[in-house]
Amino acid sequence: MKTVNELIKDINKLNSSLHEKDFLLTWEQSPDELKQVLDVADALKTLRAENIATKVFNSGLGISVFRDNSTRTRFSYASALNLLGLAQQDLDEGKSQIAHGETVRETANMISFCADAIGFVMICSSGPVTPICVKWVKRWTTATNREYFLSALR
């Protein structure tokens, strides 16, 4: 297994631009981008194994909006947020103002001020895949880029 410093050197040599790209569409990523994702995962795993903190945030909130009942996805997201130093909160549409007529866009606008990370998962299993469905599946963003986040709701 490589050391963290070796992994960081390898990562820095790669030609990639993953910022604001869709992580799930791996077929649209270059070999360097795929290698970068795997190398970052190895670096985080190595840091954790060596009991070195992986926290990027001292505190903060990561919000999840899951529109399916995916146990593995929910726990993976919560684990990733914890690894980076964020607390996790699910947005339960039934317990929010969405249930009382507020639009998802209005709710998203409000929570974007409170969150450091927001993750969406929406599985489109009934009928054809619609553009809005694809937008929901494709978007992942941070509250520091609210316009990009809100574009997922258009």
Image (cartoon, rainbow, N blue to C red):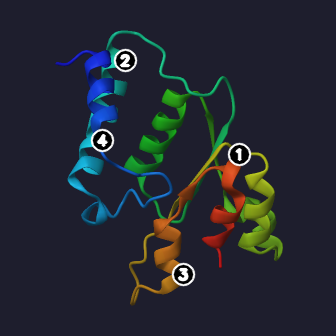
For label 4, count other residues whose C-alpha is less than 10 Å away and answer few (under 14), some (14-19) or many (20+): many
Residue placed most toward the observer, 111 or 13: 13
Residue 112 screen position, x and y as percent? 74, 54
Question: Label 2: which residue?
Answer: 47
Q: Give amino acid for label 4.
A: Gln
Position of 76 with respect to 104 (left or right) is: left
Disc 4 versus disc 2: nearer the observer? 4
**Which badge, 4 or 3, is on the more N-terminal residue?**
4
Checking the image for residue 132, the label placed there is: 3
Q: Residue at x 72, y 71 (%)?
A: 104
**Which badge, 4 or 2, is on the more N-terminal residue?**
4
Question: Label 4: which residue?
Answer: 36
Q: Residue at x 70, y 64 (%)?
A: 147
Q: Residue at x 30, y 41 (%)?
A: 36
From this view, report whether residue 27 is shown above or below residue 124: above
Mark-to-mark CA distance, 3 and 1:
23 Å
